[in-house]
Amino acid sequence: MSKASGFLKEFRDFAVKGNAMDLAVGVIIGAAFGKIVDSVVRDLIMPIVNFILGGSVDFSNKFLVLSTPDGYTGPMTYADLTQAGAVVLAWGNFITILINFILLALVVFIIVKAINSARRKDEAAPAEPAAPPEDVLVLREIRDLLKK
């Protein structure tokens, strides 16, 4: 067998092992879940925060301009300023990402807590009694023979 075919066989064995497949599924689900959390923050939580604060507060577009290029007269939006090369402290975007992280961490914590609770219930469930040791079986057999 050549080195190339040995390498390919080893790679195939690695790729189809349960751990690698579980990791791939976890990454794919995690990416999709991240999009869901991002949508929850952007589409559900931030409108409520905007309503409570009494205005159109869009944290993702809150920033502090530290310096602009000489002669810049364009729009003062985050996208236009960064494209023009301005130094911008994007504190609102950071807050939005921080909220995303906190929600994601909370959901992962709840999932891990539920899994641990289920494991504890499985461990607490009575197991089938273990088979008696060989010497106990022999002693029982002797006892039964003596009774006869």
Image (cartoon, helix red, strand yellow):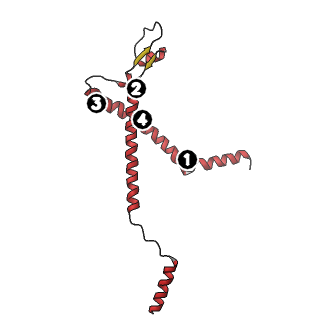
Q: Position of residue 34 (x, y in %)?
A: 43, 37
Q: Which residue is mark 2?
A: 93
- Please tell me which of labels 2 and 3 falls first in the chain: 3
Residue farthest top in this picture: 71
Instruction: Give the Cα separation between the discs numbered 4 and 1.
Output: 23 Å
Instruction: Give the Cα separation between the discs numbered 2 and 3.
Output: 17 Å
- Please tell me which of labels 4 and 3 falls first in the chain: 4
Instruction: Give the Cα separation between the discs numbered 1 and 2.
Output: 34 Å
Dot 1 amino acid type: Ala
Task: Give the number of the mark in front: 4 or 2.
Answer: 2
Q: Which residue is mark 1?
A: 20
Between 107 and 44, the one lying in front of the other is 107
- Please tell me which of labels 1 and 2 falls first in the chain: 1
- At mark 4, the secondary structure is helix
Dot 3 amino acid type: Ile
Image vertical order of residue 135 relative to residue 117, above or below: below
- Residue at point 45% right, 9% down? 72
- Residue at point 29% right, 26% down? 50
Image vertical order of residue 61 relative to residue 35, above or below: above
Q: Which residue is mark 4?
A: 35
- At mark 1, the secondary structure is helix
Q: Residues within 10 Å of mark 2 (few under 14, many from 20)?
A: some
- At mark 3, the secondary structure is helix
Instruction: Give the Cα separation between the discs numbered 3 and 1.
Output: 41 Å
CB under 8 Å between discs 4 and 2: no
Instruction: Give the Cα separation between the discs numbered 4 and 2.
Output: 16 Å
- Residue at point 42% right, 10% down? 74
Q: Which residue is mark 3?
A: 48
